[in-house]
């Protein structure tokens, strides 16, 4: 591990390099490296400008507004927040998951599969495939989906259409592409009409085929340079996520399972409403982002990874046949109980795309999604907790309300926060193994971004006003004087500004 | 068959002035006359939005912009292969370029109405300046949408481009 690079000694003699912000992640991130006179990395940190103010944004609102309101926390995974909030407010109206009407439960699952499908498709085809197909240190002009569309047109178009299909599932189930009100306290506000179901059925076989092809593609890419893919940014960690009661992969509702790096169970089938008994969050002085850890292992040993790699590692099987066959191959390739390669996040992500496509197909053939018993009501409660496996990992929403149904307390643990320590470790690994002692160049720095992007972090901002996303690299000497500056403007132009 | 005119506003209603695009859409929706106009809203532009341009006669993107020279700017878009592909939020010109790559044809005439914005904090409403800018932009959009004619829009782009 590379913890020794979290905080350097003799910081005054080091020069500082900042990659600010990291591109192709949601929101703003910044990597700072402190280098000594020989360009050896002495400190590496990933800073994230993130979710401060989310809880305050929610407090004071009536609970029934939450499923719509929380979608605005994030422009990239609004449906995940929508469903986590809905699960929490189900409890506020006295409905536990097992008492949700069958049709409502299946419609929510359909909505969630659509969300995970489109989010994963965006990440792989649009944000990561350029690195994977052209190389991490390839010319920057090649590192975009447009280059993929030019040189691998079929793959590029499939990515666009898979993403579009997932969005159409969301639109059909929730009524709108965004700001939909599909899930409400205790259920859903509409079911699918036959026409809507038939519309989605038209293309689902094609989506399953393309998803299957995407798994074959990432397997080929990964295995074509196995030692490199298995070692780049790789760290041996614990893994956490939800599973079904029988241990199958679960994205919508299940118990918490955590395994260690050897595949041994740490906790299993934990009711997520008791998450506070098992997971705590640590604060560090140099970042706003917290560091969650498993209480039983403590701060030093208890941090873990979430998301596709954790889920596919943790589950005993996947309950759709094509994805299960892919999982078996995936697990077998490493020869270990757990796959630790950080770049294997991509492979696991595409196995989940295939699982989502297969699951959508199953649900579209299930008449319950056109049922009309959609809402249940029980006795009012004052606390609700909703947990879901969002595309990037486990997402916790926890609310308390008063007698007037106003939210008095909110706590969110988002998946990117759970991966905070792991992303920092991967950054330190890349910095130590690939950058240390070498002259810094843009392709070399892209290696850092590749490591971060594998986690698909959602640094959340959803603000995107034109001209707000420059990439800046500064070299500062030991006296703090700027000696070199590389700027990537939002229009993609690269400019070197010598001080 | 999709409606001939697409009005596509993007931004986050809960992020201060970032709401300008969706709020202009709300104004247009509340004033009716949408027989030939399809209204679409999203948090940000992404690659699949290229497919929303298919079979349109005119497309108007509406967004908040800190780079705006005036209360609003109105420009015709050309496909551009910029690096906004590498983020979760693409530029409209990049969406046009994706359209060309995917459809192998020139995109329909597309224009961008940028409304000057200042503040983007979560939970904030519009800033006072943005409200004024929105009022002006709404009147302008109304005149465009009541004259869905390419020559008229091109003329307006000459008058209201970011060089005027």
Image (spheres, rainbow, N blue to C red):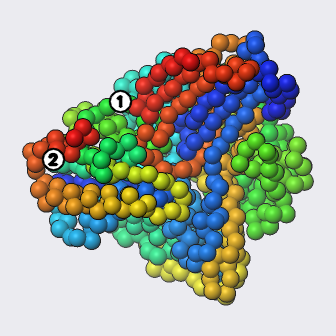
Image quarter of residue B145: bottom left
Which quadrant is the C terminus of chain A positioned in?
top right
Q: Is residue A464 above or below residue A87?
A: above
Q: Can you give x and y, in whole percent of width and height, for residue A128 in the image?
A: 53, 33
Instruction: State which chain disc 1 sits on.
Output: B
Q: Is residue A384 above or below residue A390?
A: below
Count all numbered tags in the image, as a single digit: 2
Residue A221 appears in the picture as rendered: no
Image quarter of residue A159: top left
Residue shown at the point (64%, 76%) measured from the top left: A407
Please tell me whether mark 2 sits on a helix, a strand or a loop.
helix
Which quadrant is the N terminus of chain A positioned in?
top right
- Which residue position holds label 1? B81
Contact, mark 2 vs mark 1 (Cβ under 8 Å): no
Instruction: State which chain disc 2 sits on.
Output: B
Residue shown at the point (52%, 40%) measured from the top left: A123
Is residue A8 shown left or right of residue A128? right
Q: Is residue A128 above or below residue A28?
A: above
Please tell me whether mark 1 sits on a helix, a strand or a loop.
loop
* Foreground of the two, A89 or A483: A483
Residue shown at the point (51%, 20%) measured from the top left: A497
Residue shown at the point (46%, 79%) measured from the top left: A372
Is residue A395 shown left or right of residue A300? left
Residue B71 appears in the picture as rendered: yes
Q: Can you give x and y, in whole percent of width and height, for residue A243 in the image?
A: 71, 56
- Which residue position holds label 2? B156
Q: Can you give x and y, in whole percent of width and height, for residue A289 in the image?
A: 71, 48
* Foreground of the two, B111 or B159: B159
Report the Cα–Cα distance between label 2 and label 1: 25 Å
Earlier sequence position, callout 2 versus callout 1: 1
């Amino acid at each position: 591990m590379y913890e020794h690079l979290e905080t350097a000694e003799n910081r005054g003699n080091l020069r500082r390099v900042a990659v600010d912000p990291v591109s192709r992640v949601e929101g703003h991130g910044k990597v700072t490296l402190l280098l000594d006179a020989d360009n050896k990395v002495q400190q590496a940190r990933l800073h994230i400008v993130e979710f401060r103010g989310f809880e305050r944004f929610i407090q004071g609102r009536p609970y029934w507004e939450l499923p719509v309101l929380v979608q605005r926390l994030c422009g990239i995974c609004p449906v995940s927040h929508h469903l986590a909030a809905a699960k929490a407010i189900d409890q506020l109206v006295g409905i536990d998951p097992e008492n949700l009407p069958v049709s409502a439960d299946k419609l929510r699952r359909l909505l969630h599969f659509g969300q995970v499908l489109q989010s994963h498709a965006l990440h792989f085809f649009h944000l990561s495939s350029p690195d994977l197909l052209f190389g991490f240190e390839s010319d920057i002009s090649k590192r975009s989906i447009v280059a993929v569309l030019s040189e691998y047109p079929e793959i590029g178009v499939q990515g666009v259409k898979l993403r579009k299909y997932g969005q159409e599932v969301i639109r059909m189930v929730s009524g709108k592409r965004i700001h939909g009100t599909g899930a409400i306290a205790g259920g859903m506000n509409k079911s699918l009409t036959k026409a809507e179901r038939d519309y989605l059925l038209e293309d689902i076989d094609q989506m399953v085929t393309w998803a299957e092809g995407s798994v074959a593609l990432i397997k080929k890419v990964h295995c074509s340079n196995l030692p490199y893919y298995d070692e780049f940014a790789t760290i041996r960690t614990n893994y956490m996520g939800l599973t079904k009661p029988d241990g199958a992969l679960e994205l919508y509702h299940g118990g918490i399972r955590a395994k260690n790096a050897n595949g041994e169970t740490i906790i299993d089938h934990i009711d997520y409403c008791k998450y506070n008994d098992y997971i705590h969050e640590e604060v560090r002085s140099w970042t706003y982002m917290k560091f969650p850890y498993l209480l039983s292992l403590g701060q030093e040993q208890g941090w873990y990874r979430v998301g596709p790699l954790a889920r596919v590692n943790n589950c005993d099987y996947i309950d759709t046949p094509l994805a299960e066959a892919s999982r078996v191959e995936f697990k077998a390739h490493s020869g270990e109980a757990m796959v630790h390669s950080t770049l294997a996040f991509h492979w696991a992500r595409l196995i989940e795309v295939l699982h989502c496509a297969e699951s959508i197909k199953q649900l579209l053939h299930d008449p319950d999604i056109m049922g009309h018993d959609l809402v249940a009501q029980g006795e009012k409660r004052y606390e609700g907790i909703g947990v879901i496996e969002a595309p990037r990992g486990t997402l916790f929403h926890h609310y308390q309300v008063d007698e007037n149904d106003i939210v008095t307390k909110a706590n969110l643990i988002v998946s990117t926060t759970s991966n905070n320590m792991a992303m920092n470790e991967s950054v330190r690994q890349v910095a130590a193994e690939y950058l240390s002692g070498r002259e810094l160049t843009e392709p070399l720095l892209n290696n850092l971004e590749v490591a971060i992007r594998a986690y698909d972090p959602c640094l959340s901002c959803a603000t995107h006003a034109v001209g707000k996303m420059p990439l800046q690299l500064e070299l500062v000497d030991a006296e703090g004087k700027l000696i070199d500056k590389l700027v990537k403007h939002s229009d993609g132009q690269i400019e070197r500004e010598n001080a | 068959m999709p409606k001939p005119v697409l009005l596509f506003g993007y931004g986050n209603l809960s992020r201060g002035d970032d709401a300008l695009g969706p709020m202009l859409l709300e104004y247009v929706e509340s004033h009716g006359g949408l027989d030939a106009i399809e209204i679409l809203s999203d948090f940000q532009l992404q690659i699949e939005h290229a497919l929303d341009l298919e079979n349109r006669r005119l497309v108007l993107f509406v967004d908040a912009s800190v780079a705006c020279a005036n209360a609003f700017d109105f420009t015709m878009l050309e496909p551009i292969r910029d690096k906004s592909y590498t983020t979760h939020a693409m530029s409209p010109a990049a969406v046009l370029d994706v359209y060309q790559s995917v459809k192998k044809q020139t995109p329909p005439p597309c224009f961008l109405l940028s409304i000057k914005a200042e503040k983007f904090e979560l939970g904030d409403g519009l800033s006072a300046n943005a409200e004024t800018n929105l009022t002006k932009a709404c009147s302008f959009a109304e005149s465009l949408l009541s004259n869905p004619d390419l020559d008229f829009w091109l003329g307006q782009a000459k008058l209201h481009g970011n060089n005027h």
